[in-house]
C-alpha cells in the first residue's frame, strides 16, 4: 500500500480544472453511489436464488455455495487491487472499466446454463464491482482538491457508506421478490440496467482523468503496481478463506499455506520499491491498522447476525426466504439512518464507542432469543445491529480518510473493504460451526456468545485508542468539511486565522514571515529535514553561523515536540565517485576536486547538530535528499510522516530539488526560510518569493512553536 512518499502521483490538480457551482451535486455523486452499491447488492441478493439455481441445474444445493464464496474471495482480492490500479491509471478509468465488466457479467450470468458459467459470471461481478468503492473515494478526494476544499462534505462520504450498508440489509428482501417474480436469472440480469445507468452517469458526470495512461514496459508496469505483491496477497488470502470455509473441520494444510504465504508476502513487501501492501506503514500507522481491525470485527459481528439469524428464522421459525428478508428491512432502514446521522458529525470516537456498546447489547439480547420469542422482539434485536452497522461503517470510513496517505487512498479504501469481507467470511464460518448439527436455539445462542466476545474486544480497542481522541480534537477544530481553504490575506496587516491556523509576524518572504494564514502541523506526523549542514557546504554561503544557529533552533523544536528528525548529507564513496559520468557538471567537478569524499570531516554533519538514537541520517549521492543510500521514502512511510519541514544549504540546490520532488509526492511542506541559505542571495530571494510559495508554506523558525501548538 503506497503512501505519501511514493513517486506515483496520478492526480495532478490545477485551478483550471476546478469545478464550478456545487462540486458535489447529484450529477457527480449519483454514479459513484450507484457504482459503490453494486458490490453489496450482489453480495446479498444471491442468497435467495441458491435453491432455485440448484433445482434448475439439477445439482445439490450445497454445491451452489461456491457462488457466494467466489464473489467474496474475488472481491476481497480485487478491492485493494482496484484501488492500486486507480492510483496508477486514474480513478475514472478504473471506475468505468469496472462498471463495464459488471455489465458484461450480467449478460454472461443471464445466459448461463451451467454452474461453471455462473461461477465465471460471479467472479467477473466481484472484479468489476470492486472498482466502485476505492475509485469513488479517490474521485471524491480529487474533487475536493480541485474545488479548493479542505475536505469533502461529510454527507458525501457518508453517502457511500449508506448505499453500501443499506443495500446489504435490504438485499435478501429485494432478492426474494425478484426471484419469486422473474426466476433465479434475475439475480444476474439485474446488473445490466444498474450497470448501464451507472456507466452513462459516470461518463456524463465525472471529469476525465487529467494524466495520460503510462504503461511502459511490462516489467516496469509490474514493478509499479507490485504485481508480485498482489499475487502473494491473493494466495495468502485464498488459503485463509479455504481454512475458514472448512470449519469446524480444521484444514491444517490450508492454514499452514496461509501463514507461509503471509510471511513471504511481508518479506517481499519490505523490499519492494512501491509495495502493494505497505507493511512498514501498517506497523507505524497504528491508527490506520486499528481501523482495519475494528471495521473487520464489527462487520463480522453484524454478518453473524445477518446470516445466522436469517437461517434461524427460516428453519426454527418456518419463514420463507422472502419473509425472513422482510424481517431484516428495519435493520436496513436503521443502518441508513444511523449512517446519515454519524456522517454529519466531525467527531468519530464517541460514535465508534456507541457502535461497540450497541454491538455488545445486541449480542447479549440474542442470548435471550428463542423459538418462542415474539417477532417484534426479534425485529428489535436486528434493529440494534442496524444501528451498529450504520454508525460503525461511516465512522471507520471517516478515520480511514483522515489517516490514510493521500497518494494511497485507493489501496487503503480497498483494504478496508477487504477486512470487511474477511469478517463476513469468518462470520459464515462461525455460523456454519454453530449450526453444523442443525439450526436450533442452542446454535443461535452459541453464535451470541461468540458475538459477545467479539463486541467486547471491539469496545476495549475503541475505548483505549487515544489516537481517536486526538484526531477528534484536531478535526473538530478545522474548517467544516467542504469549506474552502483560505487564500492570501487581502492586506499586509496580520489577519485573524481559523482555529487550526496560526498568524505570521511580518511580510518578509526571505526570512520566512508572511501574512498568509499557515496551516497547523502535527509534530507526530512531521519530519524535520536538515539538509547539507556540512562544513564543505557551509563555507560557501553568507552568514553560515547565523543559518546554522537557526537550524539548531529548529532541531530543538523538533526534540521538544516529538517531531521526527532527518539529517541529510552529501558524500561520495569510492564506487559512487566512479559512477559519476563526465557530463554531470556538478558531481564530475566534485569528484575531480575530491571535496565530497565520504569519511572526511568536511562531509560530516556539523558538530553543533547532534544526532540522537531515533534520528535518521541519510547519505545522498546527488542533489535531492531522495537520491540517498537509504530509502528515504520508505523510512518516512514507516514513521507515518506526511508533513515535511525543510531547512538546508543551498536554496538553489538541495532545497529546490527536494522541495519540488516532495511536492509532487503530495507531502505537506513547510520551508524554514531563515534556516536556508544560498551562495547567491538574489537567487535565494527569487526562489523564496516567486517559486517556493506555490509548493510550500514559507515560515521562520520562530513560527514553529505556534504552528505545533495550534494542532494540539
Image (tube, rainbow, N blue to C red):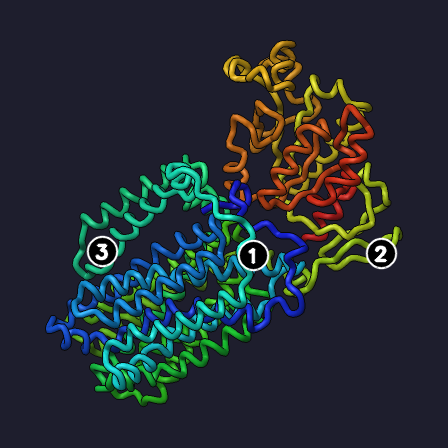
Per the image, the residue denoted by label 1 is 402
* Residue 669 placement: quadrant: top right
Residue 491 lies left or right of residue 73; in this view the side is: right
- The reply to whether residue 663 is visible in this rendering is yes
Q: Earlier in the sequence, mark 2 or mark 1?
A: 1
Residue 705 lies left or right of residue 170; in this view the side is: right
Q: Which mark is residue 242?
A: 3
Residue 289 lies left or right of residue 346; in this view the side is: left
Residue in the image at 71% along x and 23% along y: 608
Camera-nearest residue between 302 and 261: 261
Tag 3–tag 1 contact (CB < 8 Å): no
Q: CA distance from mark 2 to mark 1?
A: 31 Å
Mark 3: few/some/many CA within 10 Å (<14, 14-19, 20+)? some
Q: CA distance from mark 3 to mark 1?
A: 34 Å
**What count of labels does the image hold?**
3
Question: Relative to 519, is 6 above or below?
Answer: above
Per the image, the residue denoted by label 2 is 490
Question: Relative to 264, is 84 above or below?
Answer: below
Tag 3, which secondary structure? helix
- Expressed as whole percent of the image width and height from the top left, the position of residue 75 reads 34, 60
Camera-nearest residue between 78 and 222: 222
- Expressed as whole percent of the image width and height from the top left, the position of residue 88 reads 47, 48
Tag 2, which secondary structure? loop
- Expressed as whole percent of the image width and height from the top left, the position of residue 347 reads 59, 65
- Expressed as whole percent of the image width and height from the top left, the position of residue 411 reads 45, 52
Tag 1, which secondary structure? helix
Q: Earlier in the sequence, mark 2 or mark 3?
A: 3
Residue in the image at 82% along x and 30% along y: 682
Residue in the image at 70% along x and 61% along y: 484
Amino acid at each position: 500500500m503506497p503512501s505519501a512518499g511514493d513517486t506515483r502521483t496520478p492526480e495532478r490538480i490545477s485551478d483550471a480544472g476546478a469545478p464550478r457551482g456545487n462540486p458535489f451535486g447529484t450529477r457527480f455523486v449519483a454514479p459513484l453511489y450507484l457504482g459503490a452499491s453494486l458490490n453489496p447488492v450482489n453480495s446479498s441478493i444471491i442468497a435467495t436464488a441458491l435453491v432455485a439455481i440448484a433445482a434448475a441445474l439439477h445439482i445439490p444445493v450445497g454445491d451452489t455455495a461456491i457462488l457466494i464464496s467466489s464473489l467474496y474471495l474475488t472481491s476481497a482480492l480485487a478491492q485493494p487491487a482496484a484501488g492500486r490500479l486507480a492510483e496508477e491509471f486514474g480513478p475514472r478509468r478504473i471506475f468505468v472499466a469496472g462498471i463495464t465488466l459488471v455489465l458484461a457479467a450480467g449478460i454472461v450470468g443471464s445466459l448461463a446454463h451451467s454452474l461453471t458459467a455462473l461461477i465465471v459470471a460471479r467472479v467477473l461481478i466481484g472484479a468489476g464491482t470492486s472498482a466502485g468503492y476505492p475509485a469513488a473515494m479517490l474521485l471524491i478526494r480529487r474533487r475536493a482538491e480541485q474545488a479548493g476544499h479542505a475536505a469533502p462534505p461529510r454527507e458525501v462520504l457518508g453517502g457511500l457508506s449508506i448505499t453500501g450498508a443499506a443495500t446489504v440489509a435490504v438485499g435478501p428482501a429485494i432478492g426474494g421478490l425478484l426471484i419469486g417474480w422473474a426466476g433465479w436469472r434475475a439475480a444476474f440480469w439485474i446488473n445490466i440496467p444498474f450497470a448501464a445507468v451507472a456507466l452513462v452517469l459516470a461518463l456524463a458526470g465525472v471529469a476525465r482523468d487529467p494524466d495520460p495512461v503510462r504503461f511502459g514496459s511490462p516489467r516496469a508496469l509490474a514493478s509499479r503496481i507490485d504485481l508480485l505483491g498482489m499475487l502473494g496477497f491473493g494466495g495468502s488470502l485464498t488459503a485463509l478463506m479455504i481454512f475458514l470455509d472448512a470449519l469446524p473441520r480444521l484444514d491444517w494444510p490450508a492454514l499452514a499455506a496461509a501463514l507461509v504465504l503471509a510471511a513471504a508476502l511481508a518479506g517481499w513487501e519490505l523490499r519492494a520499491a512501491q509495495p502493494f501492501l505497505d507493511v512498514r506503514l501498517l506497523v507505524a500507522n497504528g491508527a490506520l491498522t486499528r481501523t482495519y481491525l475494528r471495521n473487520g470485527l464489527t462487520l463480522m459481528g453484524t454478518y453473524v447476525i445477518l446470516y445466522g439469524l436469517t437461517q434461524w428464522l427460516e428453519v426454527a421459525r418456518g419463514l420463507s426466504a422472502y419473509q425472513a428478508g422482510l424481517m431484516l428491512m428495519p435493520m436496513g432502514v436503521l443502518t441508513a439512518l444511523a449512517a446519515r446521522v454519524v456522517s454529519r458529525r466531525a467527531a468519530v470516537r464517541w460514535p465508534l464507542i456507541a457502535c461497540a456498546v450497541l454491538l455488545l447489547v445486541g449480542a447479549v439480547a440474542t442470548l435471550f432469543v428463542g423459538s418462542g420469542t415474539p417477532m417484534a422482539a426479534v425485529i428489535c434485536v436486528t434493529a440494534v445491529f442496524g444501528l451498529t452497522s450504520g454508525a460503525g461503517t461511516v465512522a471507520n470510513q471517516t478515520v480511514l480518510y483522515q489517516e490514510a496517505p493521500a497518494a494511497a487512498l485507493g489501496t487503503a479504501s480497498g483494504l478496508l473493504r477487504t477486512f470487511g469481507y474477511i469478517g463476513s467470511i469468518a462470520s459464515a464460518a462461525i455460523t456454519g460451526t454453530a449450526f453444523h448439527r442443525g439450526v436450533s436455539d442452542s446454535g443461535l445462542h452459541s453464535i451470541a456468545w461468540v458475538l459477545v466476545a467479539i463486541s467486547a474486544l471491539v469496545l476495549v480497542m475503541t475505548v483505549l485508542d487515544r489516537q481517536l481522541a486526538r484526531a477528534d480534537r484536531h478535526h473538530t477544530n478545522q474548517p467544516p468539511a467542504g469549506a474552502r481553504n483560505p487564500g492570501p490575506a487581502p492586506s499586509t496587516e496580520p489577519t485573524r486565522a481559523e482555529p487550526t491556523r496560526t498568524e505570521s509576524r511580518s511580510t518578509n518572504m526571505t526570512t520566512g514571515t508572511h501574512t498568509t494564514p499557515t496551516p497547523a502541523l502535527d509534530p507526530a506526523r512531521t519530519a524535520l529535514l536538515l539538509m547539507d549542514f556540512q562544513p564543505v557546504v557551509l563555507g560557501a554561503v553568507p552568514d553560515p553561523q547565523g543559518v546554522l544557529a537557526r537550524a539548531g533552533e529548529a532541531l530543538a523544536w523538533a526534540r521538544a515536540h516529538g517531531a521526527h528528525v532527518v539529517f541529510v548529507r552529501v558524500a561520495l564513496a569510492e564506487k559512487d565517485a566512479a559512477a559519476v559520468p563526465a557530463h554531470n557538471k556538478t558531481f564530475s567537478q566534485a569528484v575531480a576536486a575530491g571535496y565530497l569524499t565520504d569519511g572526511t570531516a568536511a562531509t560530516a554533519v556539523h558538530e553543533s547538530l547532534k544526532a540522537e538514537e531515533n534520528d535518521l541520517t541519510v547519505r545522498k549521492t546527488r542533489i535531492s535528499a531522495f537520491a540517498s543510500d537509504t530509502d528515504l521514502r520508505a523510512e518516512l512511510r514507516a514513521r507515518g510522516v506526511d508533513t515535511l519541514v525543510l531547512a538546508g544549504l543551498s536554496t538553489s540546490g538541495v532545497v529546490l530539488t527536494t522541495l519540488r520532488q516532495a511536492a509532487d509526492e503530495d507531502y505537506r511542506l513547510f520551508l524554514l526560510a531563515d534556516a536556508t541559505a544560498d551562495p547567491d542571495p538574489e537567487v535565494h530571494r527569487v526562489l523564496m518569493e516567486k517559486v517556493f510559495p506555490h509548493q510550500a508554506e514559507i515560515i521562520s523558525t520562530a513560527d514553529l512553536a505556534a504552528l505545533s501548538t495550534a494542532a494540539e
